[in-house]
Image: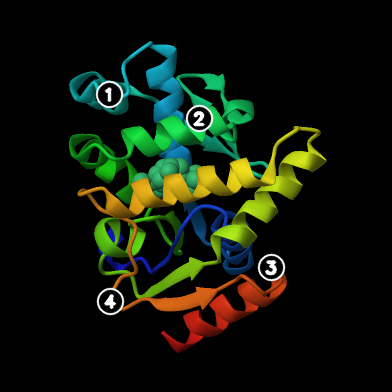
Amino acid sequence: MAQNVPVMTLDGPSGAGKGTVSRAIAQRLGWHYLDSGAIYRALAIAALDAQLALDDVDGIVRTATAMDLRFEPGEPPLVILNGADVSPLLGLEVTGDAASRVAALGPVRDALLQKQRGFRKAPGLVADGRDMGTVVFTDAGCKIFLTASAEERALRRYKQLKEKGVDVSLPDLTREIEERDRRDRERSQAPLKMADDAHLVDSSAMSIEAVIARCLEILQSC
Ligand code: DC
């Protein structure tokens, strides 16, 4: 039964390092990995593609229910939406912004619940997102809330984009990150918050390796 399959959840704001850390932990343990943000991002791409207004709840719920989404091996994994590889669009700011808007709609979140729970398969699952420990996998045996200061998260994103040759301003990025955080924290449905039984890890002054080691240490103690 899926309920017996162990789950480790990593929730927290964008840019805290959840994706890199979760993927590394899943790989080391040989567990499955759920990037729930990619599901919201793929849905945002589908909604923009269908020219839906981002507050068209019924239209977006229909799109969420109908979408065929697959993850294929890669570093990071490829995201195949209705047969097309949308991976290059996933990390765009426009996608992230639209994802944060569709993610604020309660019926849309409900429509995606079962899709996310379907990732719980033996031998285990590392689930990365905002509400993995508070809503989707409330019975997870090990919950981590990974955070970092907004300035540090903006700086990391700035360096990533610079490496890709994208010209951005650090103050603009910091503002965007703070705005998205605010929307994720203040929404009424499944707001970003730490589960009561989660362990807090602040990655602001830690290397990725140190964060991975700390999370594995926590997992052993759970
Ligand atoms: O983790 P990410 O940046 O890829 O997530 C994109 C957006 O999706 C983010 O603004 C918040 C939303 N999201 C969510 O509401 N719940 C999740 N479990 C994962 C992401």
Answer left or right for 139 relative to 77. Answer: left
Classify mark 3 as within 8 Å of ligand 1 or not, answering yes or no: no
Spatial CA span between label 4 and label 1: 31 Å
Viewer-side residue, 147 vs 68: 147
* Residue 80: percent from left, percent from top: 53, 27
**Camera-side mark, 1 or 2:** 2
- Residue type indicated by callout 1: Ile
Q: How is the image coloured?
A: rainbow
Q: Which residue bears the numbered disc 2? A: 95
- On residue 208, the disc is 3
The label shown at residue 204 is none
Where does label 4 land, which residue? Answer: 196
Circle 4 residues within 10 Å: few <14, some 14–19, many ≥20:
few
Label 3: which secondary element: helix
User: Looking at the image, is mark 4 or mark 1 earlier in the sequence?
Assistant: 1
Please indicate, yes or no, whether residue 17 appears anywhere in the rendered image: no
Tag 4 or tag 2, which sits nearer the N-term? 2
Relative to 172, residue 44 above or below: above
Residue 173 visible in rendering: yes
Q: Amino acid at mark 4?
A: Asp
Q: Nearer the viewer, residue 20 or 23?
A: 20
Which image quadrant: the C terminus? Answer: bottom left
Q: Is mark 4 within 8 Å of ligand 1?
A: no
Instruction: Tell which circle, 1 or 2, labels the residue nearer the N-terminal end.
Output: 1
Q: Which residue is denoted by mark 1 in the rendering? A: 60
Q: CA distance from mark 2 to mark 3?
A: 25 Å
In this rendering, position of residue 149 left or right of residue 67? right
The three-letter amino acid code for the residue at tag 3 is Ile
Q: Residues within 10 Å of mark 3 (few under 14, many from 20)?
A: some
* Image coordinates for residue 29, horizontal then vertical, percent: 57, 68
Secondary structure beneath dot 1 equals helix
Instruction: Please report the residue visible at 24 percent of the width from the left and 35 percent of the height from the top.
Output: 108
